[in-house]
Amino acid sequence: MTSLASPLPDVQSNQRNLLPLKLALVIGLAALADWLFWYQRIGLSFAIFAVALFAATSLGNLATLGRRRAATAVAIFLAGLAPAIEELNTLSSFLAVAALAISVAILTNPQLSRLTDGLRALIDLLLIGPFRLIGDAVRMTNVRALALWFVPLLFSAIFVALFASANPLIERWIVELKPGDANSHIDLARTLFWAFVLSAVWPFVHVRWRPRKEPTLAAPPVASTVPATPDLSNLLSAGAILRSLILFNLLFAVQTLLDVIYLWGDAKLPDGISYGDYAHRGAYPLIVTALLAAGFVLAAMRPGGPAEQSAVIRPLVYLWVGQNVLLVVSSMLRLHRYVQVYLLTGVRVAAFVWMLLVAIGLVLIVARIILKQSNGWLVRMNLISLGATLYLCGLLNFDAMIADYNVTHSKEASGKGVNLDLNYLYSLGPQALPALDRAHLLQGVNVGACGRTRLLGIQAADMASWRSWGFRSWRLQRYVDAR
């Protein structure tokens, strides 16, 4: 037993000794990513960063490198990187990331001997790994108070940043709180970028593999040379969740109150802030806020977790989810008022649909908690909602709806808003023909025979053969024939 357990202190000692080097490597990689990517077009810089990350992995994990498999790992990494050097696109970047993760697993994972081990390694590096930085930091500091307050303060800072980007009033308050202009150079978006890079590269530099679970008979415990995954229970303990929900509800109450006063109540805004800025600016950041909130609730109220049965935490969860639903509804109202001024597009219709699905998802989260259902039930219900929404969207004639709305609410028809964008109507295809005919009757609108003739030609081609026949096109053809 002594010989089996003796390597463990050496490995732990090596981990502690290499910690300053790993921290330096991670910070250096973040600085390199900032120089390569921040407000820069990405191409060869992606491959350069991948090579630097591979080198940092090798340097930070010298004690656990599989030198016999080094040639295989390097070959896989270079082969996966070649398409990204040839041309960086979605596929080549995916291949490069996958090759990097596989090569790192081959180099540093002694348990890698079958396909399931490889898939498990990829999950460790790419899905679980980015969330390890906080847990590792807590484990290294071993301060319980930090664990209880880290998540509440971190998420509160993120929510404040999102609210500031969405709400000019909150942004002004934050600016006015600064003592002079000493901190005016701080870029919050850049800070979040650094946080993302640090979290993404940490599992590659500080490699830690979960031990393989083998179905064996009970046996005396044997010390493992692979460090266990850090305990994250303190980060989402009942105390940390309670502190988080109190802070989050207070922060969201400020945004909710401002929306009730200025967005729903049409109160007069302070000087220097236009109603258009307030109403149109924050739709998308607030949706991101609601999605982050939903993720936190799922993690905090996981089945069997410490907060699920708490009589204090559950009402706070319901209150916070309710505020998030109101936040999504306010985002929809913001987008609606933006559309009232700048008319409708396909992207804005998709945004409305997406916001509706987010609101439904938030309500389903509350239903899961109240009904004590599993996360599998929540996934199924969301898939049903998504399927029903997509089916309904498949039946709706969005091109005709968008064209009709834009003609009806254009400046030429209503006297306010923006001028009708005929080029966009032409891009919608033949289904815009009825709306174009209505626009032809409006004063100051010259539809133009060329554009209409082109759409009629597309429609005629669609109806020329039974193979391209569609019921929607047939109904449009009846309209064209009648005119």
Image (spheres, grey):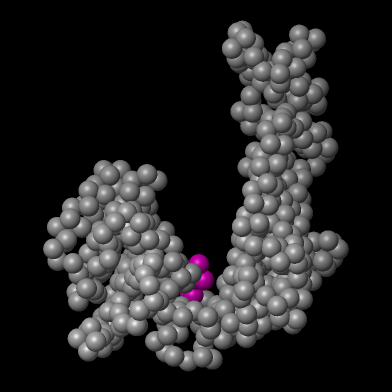
Q: How would you classify the magenta stretch by its main secondary structure?
A: loop
In the rendered image, the quadrant that contains the N terminus is bottom left
Hey, which quadrant is residue 12 in on the image? Answer: bottom left
Instruction: Please state which of residues 183 and 206 is positioned toward the viewer in this rendering.
Output: 206
Frontmost residue, 392 versus 457:
392
Give 337 or 398, whichever is nearer the viewer.
398
Residue plotted at (82% across, 39% down): 415
- In the rendered image, residue 215, in percent from the top left (x then y), is placed at 39, 67
Residue 103, quarter of picture:
bottom left
- Judge left or right: residue 127 versus residue 380: left
Q: Quadrant of the C terminus?
A: top right
Determine the residue located farthest toward the front in the rendered image. Answer: 217
Side of 75 relative to 228 (left or right): left
Q: Say whether residue 101 is left or right of residue 455.
A: left
Q: Residue at x 49, y 75 (%)?
A: 186
Residue 210: image x %, image y %?
37, 70
Where does the magenta region start and end?
185-189
Position of residue 441 relative to residue 63, above or below, is above
Residue 99, above or below 308: above
Q: Residue at left 73%, top 23%?
A: 436
On screen, residue 179 above or below 46 = below
Percent of width and height locating residue 367: 74, 62
Say if residue 472 shows up in the picture: yes
Location of residue 63 in the rendering, given as x and y in whole percent from the top left corner: 20, 76
Left or right: 177, with 343 as reference point: left
Residue situated in front as seen by the camera: 169 or 106? 106
* Looking at the image, residue 230 lies above or below residue 325: below
Rendered residue at 27%/66% (across/down) = 111
Quarter of the image for residue 89 reads: top left
